[in-house]
């Protein structure tokens, strides 16, 4: 687990202001701290995801975090809440078309400070889920 000092040090190298705001908000909350650790690190850990992959891996009604941008390749047939750093215009359109929900990580931190019932896609963690209480399972 990274210390807040280490996250702050890595944060100084970031130029994307939206990413900086997201990391700052995430590191303040125990439930979102793991997200801050991942986002403050290497860009390689922030992977984009197509709707096709999300549709394949997500369960109906689930909250999914994408640590990158959601792209529009493929179709989404499950009603899921997708939380990401960014969305392509077509991807957001497809998500909303099937009555799904699309929000940024920063917005979700404000709505759900405990990070309850959220699962992360596109990560190398063994069990990338947050518990019902919002504490990250390793």
Image (cartoon, rainbow, N blue to C red):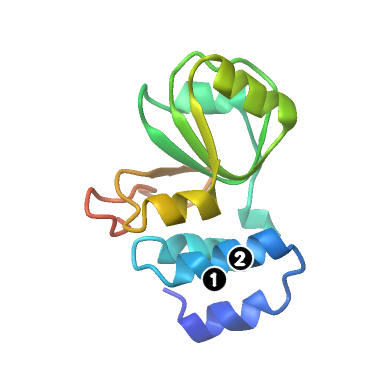
Looking at the image, is 66 positioned above or below residue 41?
A: above
Structural crowding at the residue carrying mark 2, measured as other residues with C-alpha within 10 Å and reported as few (<14), some (14–19) or many (≥20)? few
Q: Can you identify the residue that label 2 sits on? A: 21
Query: Which image quadrant is residue 52 in?
Result: top right
Q: Where is residue 79 in the image (x, y as percent from the top left)?
A: 43, 20
Looking at the image, is 1 positioned above or below residue 55?
A: below
Q: Which of 24 and 78 is in front in this view?
A: 24
- Determine the secondary structure under disc 1: helix
Q: Can you identify the residue that label 1 sits on? A: 24
Asked whether residue 125 is in view, the answer is no
Identify the residue at horizontal 50%, vertical 35% (top origin): 82
Identify the residue at horizontal 40%, vertical 50% (top origin): 111
Looking at the image, is 110 positioned above or below residue 49?
A: below
Which numbered marker is on residue 113? none
Asked if labels 2 and 1 touch by Cβ distance under 8 angstroms, the answer is yes
Query: Which image quadrant is residue 39 in?
Result: bottom right
Structural crowding at the residue carrying mark 1, measured as other residues with C-alpha within 10 Å and reported as few (<14), some (14–19) or many (≥20)? some
Q: Position of residue 29 (x, y in %)?
A: 38, 68
Q: Position of residue 9 (x, y in %)?
A: 62, 83
Q: Nearer the viewer, residue 35 or 104?
A: 104
Asked whether residue 13 is in view, the answer is yes
Please indicate whether residue 123 sits to the left or right of residue 129 in the image. right
């Amino acid at each position: 687990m990274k210390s807040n000092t280490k996250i702050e040090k890595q944060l100084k190298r970031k130029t994307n202001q939206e990413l900086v705001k997201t990391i700052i908000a995430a590191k303040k909350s125990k439930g979102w701290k793991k997200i801050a650790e991942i986002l403050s690190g290497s860009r390689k850990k922030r992977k984009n995801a197509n709707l096709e992959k999300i549709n394949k891996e997500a369960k109906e009604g689930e909250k999914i975090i994408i640590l990158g941008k959601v792209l529009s390749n493929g179709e989404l047939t499950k009603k899921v809440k997708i939380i990401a750093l960014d969305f392509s215009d077509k991807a957001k359109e497809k998500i909303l078309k099937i009555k799904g929900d699309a929000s940024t990580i920063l917005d979700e931190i404000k709505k759900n400070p405990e990070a309850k019932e959220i699962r992360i896609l596109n990560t190398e963690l063994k069990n990338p889920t947050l518990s019902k209480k919002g504490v990250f399972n390793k």
